Image (cartoon, rainbow, N blue to C red):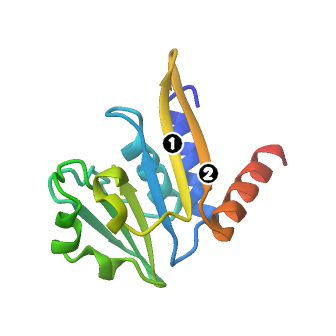
Amino acid sequence: MPDETATLDLGARLARVLRPGMTVWLVGDLGAGKTTLSRGLLRGLGFGGRVKSPTYTLVEIYPFSSFNLYHFDLYRFVDPEEWEEAGFREYFNPESICLVEWPEKGGAILPLPDLEVRLEMADAGRVARLRGGSEEGWRCIDEILLSWSG
């Protein structure tokens, strides 16, 4: 993914394959493109409003007709117990898609991902590495790969 456009494109491709009930971890350093990827995903779902990083609000909620998408940013968490105290567990349900930036800050309390997207800076661009954490996650990866080859 050499640039922002490619990151937005990957997000749009994710929008076509994710299903309610899935959890996606977005992993990467500051500036790696996690929020840009989220913006591409939301645009791919048809959301036309402003997409911002939930660094200070901890979660941004995007309601769609058949599900809610919750975009979490756990960067400011000091202790994984903060996740539990914030009442976020109820957001992870069969009617929601949950994107989680900085999942490592949630520790073992955070639900495991169906899909992990790791973004890394490389030379003049970015590299995205996708890893399935469930059968649904691997299905998503297969469908994304097919969308690029077909």
Report helix, strand or loop for mark 1: strand
Left or right: 80, with 3 as reference point: left
Q: In this view, does 58 lie above or below 63?
A: above
Q: In the figure, residue 135 lies in which quadrant?
A: bottom right
Measured from the top left, where is residue 95 in percent x and y? 46, 84
Specify the farthest residue to the front: 108
* Mark 2 neighbour density, 10 Å: few (under 14) some (14–19) many (20 or more): some
Specify the farthest residue to the top: 123
* Mark 1 neighbour density, 10 Å: few (under 14) some (14–19) many (20 or more): some
Report helix, strand or loop for mark 2: strand
Q: Name the residue under label 2.
A: 131
Badge 2 or badge 1: first in the primary sequence: 1
Q: What residue type is labelled 1?
A: Arg
> How far is mark 2 from mark 1, CA to CA?
8 Å
Residue drawn at x 52%, y 15% as measured from the top left: 123
Residue drawn at x 40%, y 44% as measured from the top left: 34
